[in-house]
Amino acid sequence: MGAEYVLQMKNITKRYGENTVLEDVSLSVRPGEIHALLGENGAGKSTLMNILFGMPVIHSTGGFGGTVSLDGETVNIHSPHDAMEKGIGMVHQEFMLLPGFTIAENIKLNREITRPNPISRVLGKNLETLDMKAMAKDARKALDSVGMSIDEYTLVQGLPVGYMQFVEIAREIDKKGVKLLVFDEPTAVLTESEADQLIGVMKQIAASGIAIIFITHRLDEVIAAADSITILRDGKLVAVRETKQTNTLELAELMIGRKGESVVSAPDRDKPHGDKVALEVNHLRVDMPGEEVRDVSLKVYEGEIFGIGGLAGQGKIGIPNGIMGLYPAAGEVKVFGQSHELDNPRKSLQSGLAMVSEDRRGVGLLLEQSIEDNIVFNAMQIKGEYLMGLRPLFTLRDGRKIRKVANQMIKDLDIRCTSALQHTGTLSGGNQQKVCIARALLMHPKLLFVSEPTRGIDIGAKKLVLETLVRLNREQGMTIVMVSSELMELRSICGRIAIISEGHAVDVLKATDTDVNFGLAMSGIRPNQEGGSVNG
């Protein structure tokens, strides 16, 4: 008879110097169950998983207290490779893919299938030829298991982030001997329909006997997918619940430690907008791989929070990227009545536009630079601010001024860090996203694009980010265009929402419109309703 638990982490304590990040935390996972691990950013989830995977950052800082057992036997996990050898796999929130390799090559990376050739028969196995046909066959099987029809020979470079997430999952599924899989925010980059699809895949994996640790901030997904739940707060174990004995409200309260607060702020979405047009888009086309925009026309009015939604790969993300000049674009765009030059990112920033990118690690941040350098980067480069000296002869960074504004942004956005000098790459995903928002806000934009602004952010930080957008809109009159895969979030703060399908704007709906009309629009069908004009 097998052990009751495939994994037990007992009384785990971890300190970095005098700072205790985990204190007497325990986690138990049964074979074939989906066990959700919840907690705000900074709660200790990442540190606990770093211990499970034997990450160098743990061993190089004094190790940890407590024990880790697999199948009832105490183990010492010395490295990520050791963890994999022991049957532990992980689907990372930040992708571990090689862009220049095909999907099949990424899925079989470090587990390549080879076949002998005349040279290898003489000089050894290391010179065998890659069996691309066999590797592609395995990759196809793994891709089919996660519902992806994309060709296995496609390069990873240029794929939409949602596709990359499924490739990550397919790679783990392809591995042999896996007994425990950790899913770290696997649905953060997925649309609602893709997330539903993924939950179905997770349940199939669990049904085969493989246990899953499901780290997510989407509480409705926890209720839908998990069998049991462990909640951490401030490095301590708060509660363990069977899913059937709890609900999203209790989980939210346990995570944030505050009662009576809604997770998402809901302003007066029905306030009338003026008749002044902030952004007019006519027949926009954007050549963004995986998010191609074929023909989109819409108007955004001054002072409104305008939403853009739709399924992954339908073009919604291509709209702000094309307008900002990050991908080749064509068509007519006017910003506050003035003709806007496409394919020119610098001109976009100079004309009062700013953007928080959906790809915070790829194009949003300088990961090896400090938080303060990231926050002021665009303002220094585009506006020449936070500099001192005799221009144009010489300029220097105004360190004092930079530190002051960075500290203010850290306070305003609750960026959890040791100081403004901490490298941005060492922050959690949610805190990295807040640095991106701080950088955009420092440009004092008249119109702000935010693309997937809450991706990978816990519910407390999500609430703060959404309330920040509402506050900017109310207090400063800033026009905001929010692109999101989270329809609930769009409906919570936006007055109107454009739904994009197959590169076209199907309709612009009011946030208070019916679920049926939103469902039809997401499917590419324009609801037959009064006042639903795309240019309305």
Image: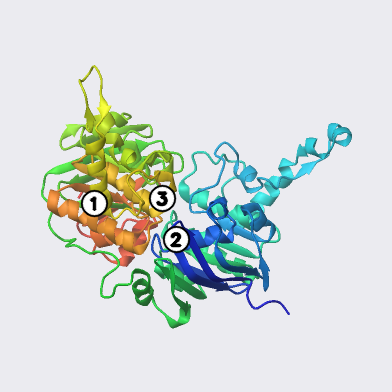
Asked whether residue 147 appears in the rendered view, the answer is no
Q: Secondary structure at mark 1?
A: strand
Q: Quadrant of residue 353?
A: top left
Quarter of the image with the N terminus in it: bottom right
What colouring style does the render use? rainbow
Disc 3 and disc 1: Cα gap in Å? 30 Å
| Residue 237, x across and y down, in percent | 45, 72
Residue at the spot of label 3: 427
Residue at the (70%, 48%) spot, across then down? 111
Q: Amino acid at mark 1?
A: Phe
Please report whichever mark, 2 or 3, sits nearer to the chain's N-terminal start.
Answer: 2
Q: Amino acid at mark 3?
A: Leu
What's the mark number on residue 515?
A: none
Residue at the (16%, 61%) spot, across then down? 270
Which numbered disc, 3 or 1, marks the residue closer to the eye? 3
| Residue 37, x across and y down, in percent | 48, 68
Label 3 environment density (alpha carbons within 10 Å; few <14, some 14–19, many ≥20)? many
Disc 2 and disc 3: Cα gap in Å? 30 Å
| Residue 48, x across and y down, in percent | 51, 62
Q: Are marks 2 and 3 in contact (CB under 8 Å)?
A: no
What's the mark number on residue 306?
A: 1
121 versus 428 height, above or below: above
Q: Residue furthest bottom?
A: 245
Q: Secondary structure at mark 3?
A: loop
Closer to the camera, 86 or 47? Answer: 47
Asked whether residue 60 appears in the rendered view, the answer is yes
Disc 2 and disc 1: Cα gap in Å? 22 Å
What's the mark number on residue 193?
A: 2
444 versus 182 height, above or below: above
